[in-house]
């Protein structure tokens, strides 16, 4: 973060934290926007895709959430939380 309190465009940590803040305050669109900024900086950020998935799931977009969890797993096959969330959503479809 700059001294004037504004986030630098390429500061992925700040965008990630701001996205989590928005998520915790039920501001889905704003959270997703911040997580997408992380992806613009680091296209290989499995965490950013996971967080978009988590946000989409919480806001009722289960198809979008599955897509994001799958993308996170394609970047990091050992991402346990993404696998658990994806398996849960796939299980919900079968019921």
Image: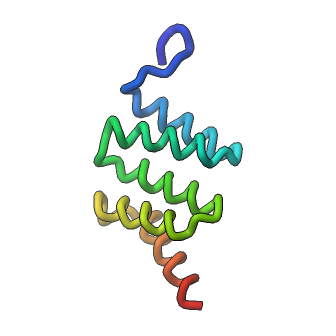
Farthest-out residue, top: 3
Locate residue 24, reporting x and y percent. Answer: 66, 46
Is 82 placed above or below 16 here? Answer: below
Question: Along the horizontal axis of the image, is 44 left or right of 94?
Answer: left
- Please state the horizontal and vertical placement of residue 93, each as a whole percent of the image: 55, 84
Q: Position of residue 41 (x, y in %)?
A: 33, 35
Q: Quadrant of residue 80?
A: bottom left
Tell me if residue 24 comes above or below residue 14 in the rendering. Answer: below
Name the quadrant containing residue 72: bottom left
Which residue is painted at 38% across and 62% down in the image? 79
> Left or right of 56: which side holds 40?
left
Horizontally, residue 80 falls left or right of residue 18, namely left
- On screen, residue 95 above or below 77: below
Q: Can you name the residue that lies furthest to the right here? A: 25
Going 54% across and 9% down the picture, which residue do you hit? 4
> Is 6 located above or below residue 24 in the figure?
above
Query: Measuring 51% from the left and 8% from the top, which residue is drawn there?
Result: 3
């Amino acid at each position: 973060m700059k001294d004037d309190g504004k986030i630098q465009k390429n500061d992925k940590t700040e965008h990630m934290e701001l996205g989590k803040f928005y998520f915790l305050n039920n501001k889905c669109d704003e959270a997703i926007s911040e997580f997408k900024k992380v992806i613009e900086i680091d296209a290989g950020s499995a965490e950013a895709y996971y967080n978009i998935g988590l946000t989409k799931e919480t806001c009722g977009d289960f198809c979008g959430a599955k897509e994001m969890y799958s993308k996170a797993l394609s970047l990091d096959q050992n991402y346990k939380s993404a696998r658990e969330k994806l398996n849960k959503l796939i299980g919900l479809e079968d019921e």
